[in-house]
Each structure stands twice: as C-alpha cells, then as structure tokens.
Amino acid sequence: MGLRSSGSQTFVVENAFVPDNMVAPFYDFRRAGEDPEGTFGTRLHGNSMYVGITTSLFTAVISAVMVGAAWAALDEYEEILRTKKTINPPFHERYKSLEYQRTVGQVVMEIRAAEVQVIEVARQYTQACQQWQAGIAYSAEKDFLQGAMATQAGKMAAESIEKIFYAGGSTAAKKGQRLNRYFRDMATYRTHPIAQYDTAAEGVGQAHFGLPIPMLEAVGGARSKR
C-alpha cells in the first residue's frame, strides 16, 4: 500500500557516547507553548517557531500532501475524460457529459476548500507563535483545534481522491496506473492516527463544551514523563 514502506521505525544505538551539549530532554511538547520560558529551541535560535507545538503543524503538513495528491488525481482524471468516450450514447468525450462534469465540480470544490483550509491553519499557527513571543500562551487546546481543522482538510482531500478513483474506470485502477498510486497513498494516509476523523471530532466536541480533552494529556503529558 501507499509508498510500499514498512512504516515508522525505532532505531537503537548501543555503546555510543553522546556529549551533553548534543542531546535534548524529551519534554511535554503538547504544553510547551504554555511555558513563557520557551524551549531549548527558542532559547537557542531566538525564534518562536521553535516553541515546539507540533499537532497543528504535523497534521497540516500531511494534509497538505493529501491536497497535492488530490490535485494530481484530478489532473489524471481530466486526462481520462478528454481521451475516453462515454460508454452509453450519445458517444463523445467524457468531459462533455454532465455525469462526469458533476464529479469534477464536486472534487474541485472539495480540493480548493481543503487547500484554503490548510493555508489558514498555517497562518493561524504562525500567528500563534508570534503571539507566544509577545507573552500570549499557545495552549495545547488551541493547537489541537487548529490541528482538527487540518484533519478536516485532509478528509476532504482524501474523499475527493476516492470519488475520482471510483469514477476513473477499471483501466485507471490497474497496477502501475497513476490513479492506482494516488488511491493507495490516500488509503495509507487513512491508517494514520491523525486521519481518524471521529477521534478528532470527539476532542473538538469536548473543547466546545469547555471539557477536558483527555487525549492531550495521554499524548503529550503522561507518556512523555516515562
């Protein structure tokens, strides 16, 4: 599936000496933006982008990849519509058929919306980092909600790839075809924790009612204190 890789790996280095000035402690990264003293990164570089907030950034980066894959899938689908004929009369290039025009219209709206959403998350992330430098905390809750926006963008992009793949025909689904590859990449993305939309929705619902978001502490709190 996807890139045909073996997933995330753990590397263990044994009997190696690493000087103190070459290592950094593992910190509660989900709450790093709430510490006015910052992180070793902000102190070293004097740049608020090193405050260590990761959820929104990480999610937006992967969602941006999915948006790119969706545009690529649309390019391939357009080539199919311009070169293949309809299977039912009247016989003409598929792009002239209302059925295929509708699919293109749907996915263009979804991909454009996803793209704008990823860009907006990036803008909010940059702004929040600048505000932290001015003394305004970058809370884990704010980071989570921004990440949830990026998750929704990834969802729209992934669903557009699905629509294109199903409408592309059996020839485009064969091994070695580009739509086959884009669909596999999308399916692999869907296995990642950040692409579990229901989990993100639960956290957003908790935040909406002012309730604690347990997953914040589970990921960045308790686990990082091992």
Image (tube, rainbow, N blue to C red):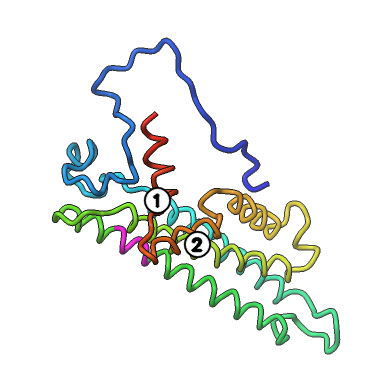
- Specify the quadrant of the image occupied by residue 217: top left
Contact between labelled residues 2 and 1, with CB atoms less than 8 Å apart = no
**Relative to residue 54, is residue 27 depicted above or below?**
above
In reply to whether residue 197 is colored magenta, the answer given is no
**Relative to residue 15, is residue 98 depicted above or below?**
below
State how far apart marks 1 and 2 are (Cα). Answer: 15 Å
Q: Residue furthest right?
A: 88
Residue pictured at 60% horizontal, 54% vertical: 190
> Residue 112 or 74: which is nearer the viewer?
112
Residue pictured at 49% horizontal, 65% vertical: 153
Q: Position of residue 28 (x, y in %)?
A: 32, 39
Q: Residue furthest top?
A: 15
- Disc nearer the start of the sequence (1/2): 1
Magenta stretch in the rendered image:
120-125
Q: Which residue is mark 1?
A: 55
Is 135 left or right of 25, judged from the image as shown? Answer: left
Mark 2 falls on what kind of element? helix
Mark 1 falls on what kind of element? helix
Which kind of residue does numbered mark 2 sit on? Ala
Q: Main secondary structure of the magenta part?
A: helix
Query: Residue 201, which numbered label?
Result: 2
- Image quadrant for the C terminus? top left
Residue pictured at 45% horizontal, 64% vertical: 205
Q: Position of residue 156 (x, y in %)?
A: 55, 67
- Specify the quadrant of the image occupied by residue 43: top left
Residue pictured at 21% horizontal, 54% vertical: 137
Q: Position of residue 14 (x, y in %)?
A: 45, 13
